[in-house]
Amino acid sequence: MKVVILCGGRGTRIRDVADNIPKPMVPVGEFPILWHIMKSYAGGGYTDFVLCLGYQQQAIKDFFLNYEAHTGDFTLTLGADKAVEYHGAHDEEGWKVTLADTGLDALTGARVKRVARYLEGDENFMLTYGDGLGDIDYEALVDFHRSHGRILTVTGVRPPGRFGELAGDESGLVTEFNEKPQATGGRISGGFFVCRRELFDYLDDRQDLVFEQEPLRALVGDGQMMVYRHDGFWQCMDTYRDYRLLNGLWEGGEAAWKNW
């Protein structure tokens, strides 16, 4: 099953981290968040990717065209007989990555529609965003999707709280404090969709088509959307605070999304 990743947005809310690279290339540790997302899917057995590119797409193309140079050591021989010798192997051998230009200013619905040709013959495919990480059980997610037969499955997550959560007794004594806990209330879409091919019947090529608005409302109205409940780790990278949080988890050896 192929994995479509939306990588074309401008990421305006995280410009204080880096305004010269696309949001999926913002680093978590040594590598872009996009790499972490792909590694997580690969850890679940999914290694055929379609990247929907747009804003500053050349940075993503260059990363994959020069993947060995970006991720390992190499020796250059200069001159007329120039050559490059890469040292060691990496775990990403065998990945298939399609880099598709879906337009500079296209919104999410149009971007998904524009990669339909790379999914011909696929009854189902995965879909997610290039800025969110989670410890998703991909096998359970796909099994759930196949079990209900609807067009779209969305992963429903409990968003992390924006502030520390306090618990206290009747006297006011604090008995528990959790920094950015998972919310205990309702769920939001965490991305990590699984889609039947019929999804494309709900999309068109309009530049301003937002996947999360008209198409999803139509799917809900037709009874074609199901939610897979995920109670584990999930975190998007929208702000500098999120960037610091994800990097802190990675550097501290507490990256829940790492399944490789």
Image: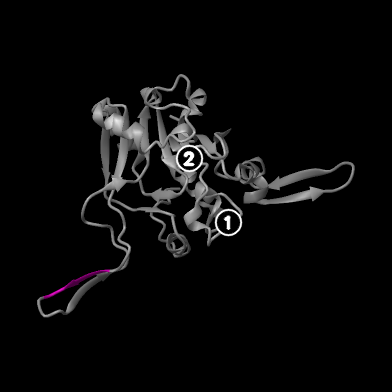
What percent of the width, then of the height, locates residue 15? Answer: 53, 58
Q: Amino acid at mark 1?
A: Asp
**Residue found 67% across the figure and 44% down from its top:** 66
What percent of the width, then of the height, locates residue 241? Answer: 43, 64
Horizontal arrangement in the rendering, residue 109 relative to residue 82 (left or right): left
Query: CA gap, disc 2 to disc 1?
Result: 18 Å
**Residue found 55% across the figure and 50% down from its top:** 25
Q: Nearer the viewer, residue 134 or 94?
A: 134
Is residue 238 a member of the stretch shown in magenta?
no
> Number of labelled discs?
2
**Secondary structure under the numbered disc 1 in the rendered image:** loop
Q: Nearer the viewer, residue 53 or 40?
A: 53
Among all residues in the image, which is located at the extreme top? Answer: 121
What percent of the width, then of the height, locates residue 240? Answer: 47, 62
Q: Is residue 248 above or below residue 63?
A: below
Say few, some or many: other residues with alpha carbon within 10 Å of mark 1 (under 14 / 14 to 19 / 20 or more): few
Q: Amino acid at mark 2?
A: Leu
Residues shaded magenta:
165-169
Horizontal arrangement in the rendering, residue 132 relative to residue 61 (left or right): left
Q: Main secondary structure of the magenta part?
A: strand
Q: Which residue is mark 2?
A: 6
Which of the labelled discs sits on residue 19, or is there none? 1
**Residue found 88% across the figure and 46% down from its top:** 79
Q: Do we see residue 46 in this rendering?
A: no
